Image: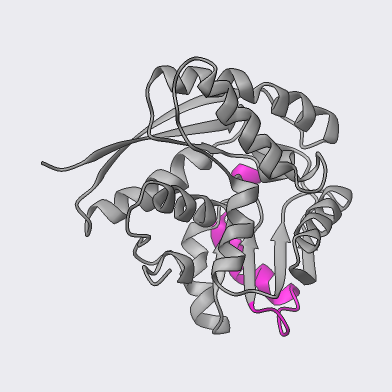
Amino acid sequence: MTKKYRIGQIVPSSNITMETEIPAMLNARQQVEPEKFTFHSSRMRMTEVTKEQLEAMDNDAKRCVVELADAEVDVMGYACLVAIMSRGLGYHEQSQDQLESRVEGIGKSIPVVTSAGALLEGLRVLGAKKTAIIAPYMEPLTKKVVEYIEHEGIEVTDYVALEIPDNLEVGSRDPLALVEIINRLDHSDADVVVLSACVQMPSLEAVQIVQDAIGKPVITAAIATTYTMLKTLGLKTFVPDAGELLSGKY
């Protein structure tokens, strides 16, 4: 019998990408691997990517994990990297512990993956000492992301901040625009390029194109989240045409 997994997603209310890119990757995987997936979301309010709205949204995540636990999902993915990274260095570990404890408080045990923690794991798995990133955030929030990554021991050699405050606008971008934006990023010293340090900025269609063009591993927050979910579930970390991290080698 084919094993079926329920994927829970904790999603900002204005996010329109997490529920398209992660299902797209896992649905593509279903064509070549035996496991099947269904997708279940709970939303937390956020429209503008500001520190105030991000904090209020993050505080609402405890409600979301309880709702998803009621559906008895197999793993939960927290879909806002900057909400975690803007709350203080190392906060991804605290967030994961708090959310998993909240689920345990209603008598269930379900692992929680944060996109922030997943991106760091993905960079480490690929052996990155240095990275270069593209982010849609305003400059101050992008600098917080850079500081957060560097605090975890990975040097950010360069970054591009697209400075888009409206989260819905971020999710409405053409992913193939990144094929040109990569030319604005100095990735010459980077071991791995983060094409989108945001699960809301569409990027999946561009990842393999950019990786083939620059000849080094390319990942995104969404790809890293998918990788960590598959690893957490004990499944083969392979998705066709989704970059080096999901090549099945790691």
Which quadrant, please, contains the C terminus?
Answer: bottom left
Q: Quadrant of residue 129?
A: bottom right
Q: Quadrant of residue 1?
A: top left
Q: Is residue 102 magenta?
A: no
The single residue placed furthest to the right in the displayed view is 140
Answer with left or right where residue 1 lies relative to residue 62. Answer: left
Q: Does any portion of residue 201 appear in the rendered image?
A: no
Display coloring: one colour
Q: Is residue 230 above or below residue 185?
A: above
Badge count: 0
Q: Position of residue 102 (x, y in %)?
A: 58, 22
Q: Is residue 53 above or below residue 90?
A: above
Q: Does any portion of residue 39 appear in the rendered image?
A: yes
Q: Is residue 186 magenta?
A: yes
Answer with left or right where residue 69 lies relative to residue 27. Answer: right
Nearest the viewer among 84 and 234 is 234
Question: Magenta region: which residues?
Answer: 170-191
Q: Position of residue 133 (x, y in %)?
A: 71, 65
- The residue at 58%/52% (across/down) is 118
Answer with left or right where residue 17 lies relative to residue 187. Answer: left
Q: Is residue 149 above or below residue 10?
A: below
- The residue at 61%/56% (across/down) is 119
Nearest the viewer among 95 and 56 is 95
Q: Position of residue 176 (x, y in %)?
A: 55, 62
- The residue at 86%/53% (across/down) is 139
Q: Is residue 241 above or below residue 197?
A: below
- The residue at 63%/34% (across/down) is 97
Q: Position of residue 226 (x, y in %)?
A: 46, 51
The single residue placed furthest to the left in the displayed view is 1
